[in-house]
Image: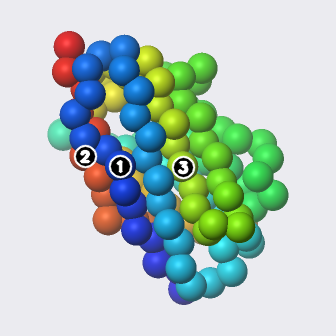
Amino acid sequence: QVQLVQSGGGLVQAGGSLRLSCAASGGTFSRYDLGWFRQAPGKERELVAAINWLGGNPYYTDSVKGRFTISRDNAKNTVSLQMNSLKPEDTAVYYCAARLPSLSYKYWGQGTQVTVSS
């Protein structure tokens, strides 16, 4: 019911910053929980950050706490992931995703590559 289109990503040096954005259409954006996932080659997809439909209770996986910030702008139907102090271990394809609260993440962006060089 919701379509997600990502922008951002690219190549950045270790210690640098990058901002990912995801624009949504369809559905009722403000009702969805939003998350950012990543998948590195040979590894399972992991949830990096999430924010609920009220914009509170942000979640971050331990490896990115203090470095990444998830935010949403319901007026613009966007969710962003600000990534600071990037490390080579952050290299992955990043996906935004949406879910109705209590349900699984079933709506996905197309993915964008983030490569952090040392």
Residue shown at the point (40%, 68%) measured from the top left: 5
Circle 2 residue: 113
Q: Is residue 28 visible?
A: yes
How far, Cα to Cα, is label 3 from label 1? Answer: 10 Å
Q: Earlier in the sequence, mark 2 or mark 3?
A: 3
Amino acid found under the numbered disc labelled 1? Gly
Classify mark 3: helix, strand or loop.
strand
Identify whether 60 is placed above or below 33. Answer: above
Amino acid found under the numbered disc labelled 2? Gln
Amino acid found under the numbered disc labelled 3? Ser
Q: Is residue 40 visible?
A: no
Image coords of residue 53 (percent x, y): 75, 61
Mark carried by residue 80: 3
User: Are the residues flagged by discs 2 and 3 in contact, CB closer than 8 Å?
Assistant: no
Mark 2 surroundings within 10 Å by alpha-carbon count, few (fewer than 14), some (14 through 19), many (20 or more) = some
How far, Cα to Cα, is label 2 from label 1? Answer: 9 Å
Single out the residue that lies furthest toward the front. Answer: 76
Identify whether 116 is placed above or below 47. Answer: above
Image coords of residue 114 (percent x, y): 28, 39
User: Are the residues flagged by discs 2 and 1 in contact, CB closer than 8 Å?
Assistant: no
Viewport quadrant of the C terminus: top left
User: Are the residues flagged by discs 3 and 1 in contact, CB closer than 8 Å?
Assistant: no
Circle 1 residue: 8
